[in-house]
Image: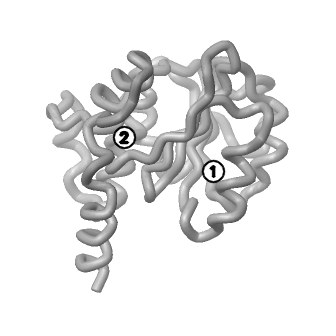
Amino acid sequence: MWWIRRCFVWLTRAHKCQGFGIQSPTDYAFVREVINQHTPYYAYETFVEDDWLTRKLGRLYFRLANLRQPHHMVRDSYARYWKAGCRTMTLIEPAADTGVIELARLTVDDDVDAMLSRCDANSVLVIEGIYRNWERWHMLQNDKRVGTTFDLYYCGLLFFDKHRYGHKYKVNF
């Protein structure tokens, strides 16, 4: 049954793949080079034992860490993906206060409001399970501190750069 749902999601978003309809050159490049990058990276062969969704999200997180190069990040179940993307990053425990958040992964049911107050223009939040709590995801997208968002169905990305025109993208991932 999950295979049918996966195909349905892909088909309903087929016209939103590879950056079609994105006018911003920066956002278009992000979709093409990070979200929908299919070229194999140097660390992909170490991620073969995971299930398809963990591997798919993990590879995205690897590319995101590779792009952003954060100094520190909260340790989570995808720590090896984050660390493979940025080897100089320090993984810290969830209870530690690190000041400004550079890159973090949460679920839609976590206390995202506490994290939003610690974000600046260079922060990126990854929110998993956005379709489990659709109203909460829309509240996060419409928060005045959030700029550009990407709805990837399996997760959402929140960017906080308010110097650029904010947009809400739905991308076939």
Q: Nearer the viewer, residue 28 or 130?
A: 28
Measured as percent of width and height from the top left, residue 86 is found at: 43, 23
Q: Say which residue label 2 marks.
A: 60
Residue 76 visible here: yes
Q: Where is residue 20, by image quadrant?
A: top left
Q: Where is residue 104, by image quadrant?
A: top right
Q: Is residue 70 left or right of residue 123?
A: left
Residue 86 visible here: no
> Which label number is shown at residue 154?
none
Q: CA distance from mark 1 to mark 2?
A: 15 Å
Identified by mark 2, the residue type is: Leu
Identify whether 131 is placed above or below 58. below
Helix, strand or loop at mark 1:
strand
Q: Nearer the viewer, residue 28 or 125?
A: 28
Measured as percent of width and height from the top left, residue 160 is found at: 67, 26
- Residue at 67% x, 13% y: name it: 163
Helix, strand or loop at mark 2:
helix
> Which label number is shown at residue 106?
1
Callout 2 crowding tier (Cα within 10 Å): few <14, some 14–19, many ≥20:
many
Q: Where is residue 67, by image quadrant?
A: top left
Identify whether 153 is placed above or below 126. below
Q: How many marks?
A: 2
Q: Nearer the viewer, residue 98 or 31?
A: 31
Q: Is residue 31 left or right of residue 41?
A: right
- Residue at 75% x, 28% y: name it: 119
- Residue at 44% x, 20% y: name it: 24
Identified by mark 1, the residue type is: Leu
Measured as percent of width and height from the top left, residue 70 is found at: 55, 21
Name the quadrant of the N terminus: bottom left
Q: Is label 1 in contact with label 2 (beta carbons under 8 Å)?
A: no
